[in-house]
Structure formats: structure tokens, C-alpha cells
Image (cartoon, helix red, strand yellow):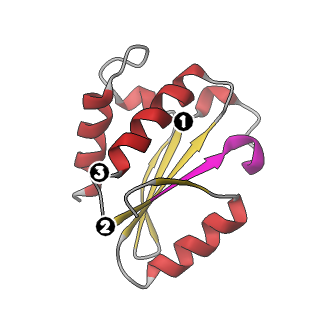
Amino acid sequence: MGALRDATPDEYVDIVDEWAQSGDCVVVVILVNSSAASRRSESIERALAAGFAETVFLRVSADECGFADASVVSIVLVRRGGELKHNLVRVVDHLSDPNGFVSHDVTQLLDSILCK
């Protein structure tokens, strides 16, 4: 907790199952390594994860999940108590400036969805 950890799709399922009992949040970030937006959001999310000590942050490769369309990533899934609470496909579309977003934009988005 408090860090963005790498996980395979299988590990992600195991971790979600494990944390479902606690009621804490699991945030899964699905990224494409070759995407500039993915690289930018990953570095921001790594820094932000430290501020959410009760939340597990996982980074999963879109390639490993079988996503062929890089235009839909980054994807952020928020699970609490085993249930999917938020599914943000192409997360940059949820930010004020999809091309020039900064840490504050991502922090504000995460605060709004993690506090619900």
C-alpha cells in the first residue's frame, strides 16, 4: 500500500480477491508502455499512491490484458469490497486538459472517486 506496484492480470485478480474482505480500495491502472499519456499518468500515479495509504495501487500492462487499441488507455478501475466502483476508460478524458494534464488534475480526480 502507498505505492504503485506492478501486477500481471492473474496477480491483479488474486489481489482484488484478497483485499475484497477488508473493504479497502484497490486501484488498477492499465497502461500502454509506448503511450506518452500512459507514461505521464504512471509517473504521477506513482507519486500520488503514497498519499493514499489505505489503497492498493496496481499497474497492469494493457498488452498483457489483451488490449489492442492503445487509444482507450490509460484505464483506471477502482474496486472496493470486491465490487467495481469506477471504470474510467481513457482516463485522460476525465481530466481538464487531456494533453497537458498535471499532477493536480490526477490528484483531484482520484480524490473525487476514492472518497465515494
Q: Amino acid at mark 3?
A: Ile
- Looking at the rendered structure, the secondary structure element under dot 3 is helix
- The answer to if 60 sits in the magenta stretch is yes
Asked which quadrant contains residue 25, the reply is bottom left
| Residue 16 appears left or right of 2 | right
Give yes or no for residue 112 being in the magenta stretch. Answer: no
Q: Nearer the viewer, residue 22 or 85?
A: 22
Q: Amino acid at mark 2?
A: Glu
Q: Position of residue 90 (x, y in %)?
A: 51, 33
Question: Which structural element holds mark 2?
Answer: loop
**Where is mark 2, residue-wise?**
54
| As drawn, 50 above or below 99 | below
Residue at 49% in and 36% down: 42
Q: Amino acid at mark 1?
A: Ser
Label 1 Cα crowd, 10 Å radius (few <14 / some 14-19 / many 20+): many
- Disc on res. 113: 3
Q: Relative to 52, say whether 39 is above or below.
A: above
Q: Which mark is residue 74?
A: 1
Secondary structure of the residue carrying tag 1 is loop
Q: Residue at x 36, y 31 (%)?
A: 94
Mark 2 nearby-residue class (10 Å; few <14, some 14–19, many ≥20): some
- The residue furthest top is 100
